[in-house]
Image (spheres, coloured by chain):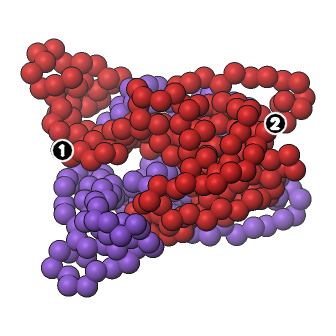
Chain colours: A red, B purple
Amino acid sequence: MNASDSESTRIGPWTWQNSRDIYQNPWIHVREDKVIRPDGEEGIYGVVEFANWAIGVVALDASGRIVLVGQHRYPLNYYSWEIPEGGCLKGSDTLEAAAARELREETGVEAKRWDYLGCFTLSNAVSDEVAHLFLARDLTQGEPSPDPTEVLQVKWEMLEEACRQVLEGEITESISIAGLLRAKHFLENEKAGVKKEYKRGP
Amino acid sequence: MNASDSESTRIGPWTWQNSRDIYQNPWIHVREDKVIRPDGEEGIYGVVEFANWAIGVVALDASGRIVLVGQHRYPLNYYSWEIPEGGCLKGSDTLEAAAARELREETGVEAKRWDYLGCFTLSNAVSDEVAHLFLARDLTQGEPSPDPTEVLQVKWEMLEEACRQVLEGEITESISIAGLLRAKHFLENEKAGVKKEYKRGP
């Protein structure tokens, strides 16, 4: 869509009129749309578009432990423990290939068995970011090869304990929250012989 | 912090050098920082700052149902069912006052009993957005008064059923995922006589 389109476009109760590029770096693109709001008035809508799908991996070993990665998060200036995460450039890799790569780079772990745990939206009033979640099993430990811009620590916790930390506000990052709790539910369903397919979009 | 500061500032393994304002609207401020990356190279970091704390409310009635709000989300152009959500302008209202206001405006519901369910970060590699979660009980139903820019539907679901939808990827919005699952855990703890305090920051 660009400003020269003569037809306006409906987006739910909004009418899109035109878009203005504001900013782009390798990770995000910011645009401001001129819109007709649901109440009929003229307005603007600023949207942060993401170049990547976000990816989160719950990697579970044979003794019921999952791997967590610790790192300093720049925008909020705090230290955060999270499941292995990364990005999948839209239209390049498959989600599964990106998940395997991020897990291997951040922790050195490789997995033979992968299950998809669905996706979710991170900040859907402002951005188009979507995270896709995976459960990885049948693990082997190799050497990590983190991105030179990352300084990471790695630790293993029992899945049950990590879920308690999510539910009591000690793990506070959205992809870890959704990934760990969906993994626990998926494993309970699996044990009960129940198999649900997760949809690939929000 | 501005470009005339002579001292550079450490942010974890990064060194902040200066910030450039890119864009501002009533909801977000985008800036680009010049940084020294963890590997010692010069780089940039684009940060999306949020004017508001995000707020999410799980409102539970006496028969175990919670209220969900349906609305079209512009950035991803899809329809989403979510717990009542809104913003609390940083430094103005208390989180509790904002939570009560958003619940009342979107659903008409007022609550006499409030519990804090902690907070979480939504997209912590790119933005400073933090959501704060509440459980609201002892409800009375009044008239909603939605923002004129919102077109909302309201429905009630059993909390257990909403949590199933979260865990099986039918509810796909981050604040609803964290809020509903923490609410269920909080209520289980309460029934067992366990009281945990949630911390107010990530």
- A151 horizontally vs B92: left or right: right
Q: Position of residue B15 (x, y in %)?
A: 34, 74
The residue positioned 56% from the left and 41% from the top of the image is A101
- Callouts 1 and 2 close, C-beta under 8 Å: no
C-alpha distance separating marks 1 and 2: 44 Å
Residue occupied by mark 2: A187
- Residue corresponding to mark 1: A22
Chain of the residue where label 2 is placed in the rendered structure: A
**Image quadrant in which the C terminus of chain B is located:** bottom right
Mark 1, Cα crowd under 10 Å, few <14 / some 14-19 / many 20+, is: some
Q: Residue at x 28, y 60 (%)?
A: B44
In the image, B135 versus A192, the foreground residue is: A192
In the rendered view, tell whether residue B83 sits above or below residue A81.
Answer: above
- Give whichever of A116, B114 is nearer the camera: A116
The one nearer the camera, A53 or B160, is A53
Q: Quick check: A4 above or below B44? A: above
Query: The residue under label 1 is which amino acid type?
Result: Ile
Farthest top residue? A7
What x and y, as percent, mark residue B33?
A: 26, 64
Q: Position of residue A43 (x, y in %)?
A: 19, 37
Mark 2: secondary structure = helix
